[in-house]
Amino acid sequence: MPRSLVILSGGQDSTTCLYWALARFGRDHVTALTFDYGQRHRIELDCAATVAALAGVPQTVLPIDTFTALGGSALTDSGVAVQRELDPKTRLPNTFVPGRNLIFITFAAAYAYPRGIQHLVGGMAQTDYSGYPDCREATLKALEQALRLGMEFDFTLHTPLMFKTKKETVELARDLGALPALAHTHTCYHGRQPPCGECPACILRARGFAGAGIADPLVERFKGGVA
């Protein structure tokens, strides 16, 4: 059985992809890789560790904190508030971290190469409401080819959620048995648990669960003040 490496952020999408990889490759052939990239909300790292433990897969945390030095995103800059409006120049929200997915996948490939892991799995989706350009299929196919050429290694980049809506992603998580793990994920742009329910990420997540007719396990976990 081929081996796979899942880029695990601790969020809803990457957790769903982790369980997709478990179903596709088998538990003994799945490893999780999490990036400590200087994100403002360190709770992401705690969630990723919890999810990996629940899934029963080994996890490595790789420190790449240069994003904080680069700046330019509300997810890395402590003095930048999340804005609902798009940047008039880029037409992207200020939660976009320039180059993040490109760098994540490149580092994941560099980690996988000496370990003989050919299959990389990520939660990127072209249907992402923010329209992040590094989530698009064309971008990721080009990167996949560059990695194959640059390392002379037959990588395959899997993006199971590429064309799924949030509703369909929730339904896939249910079918994969990932809902209990989703109770320990993090989505909120304000870094809150329970989630704020008001930021764009929380709203999108809530719509997905509502559309699927499924209660969000994360919200349910905090009902009554119980974490």
Image (spheres, rainbow, N blue to C red):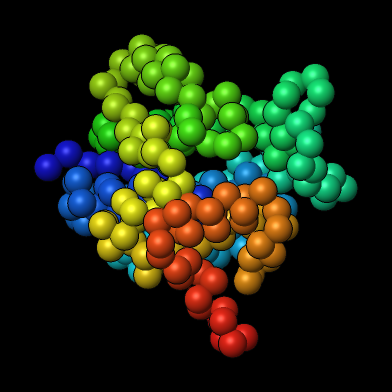
The reply to whether residue 70 is in sight is no
Position of the N terminus, as image quadrant, is top left
Give me the residue at 54% from left, 71% from top: 219
Give me the residue at 34% from left, 54% from top: 171
The reply to whether residue 223 is in sight is yes
Question: Horizontally, is 20 left or right of 205 in the view?
Answer: left
Q: Quadrant of residue 211?
A: bottom left
Q: Position of residue 89 (x, y in %)?
A: 80, 19
Position of the C terminus, as image quadrant, is bottom right
Q: Position of residue 117 (x, y in %)?
A: 27, 36
Q: Position of residue 6 (x, y in %)?
A: 37, 45
Give me the residue at 79% from left, 28% from top: 87
Give me the residue at 58% from left, 37% from top: 129
Instruction: Between residue 166 and residue 221, name the one nearer to us.
Output: 166
| Residue found farthest to the left | 1
Q: Position of residue 175 (x, y in %)?
A: 26, 57
Question: Horizontally, is 88 left or right of 135 in the view?
Answer: right
Question: Horizontally, is 25 left or right of 56 in the view?
Answer: left
Q: Quadrant of residue 88?
A: top right
In the displayed structure, 91 sits above or below 79; it is above
Instruction: Between residue 36 and residue 227, name the one nearer to us.
Output: 227
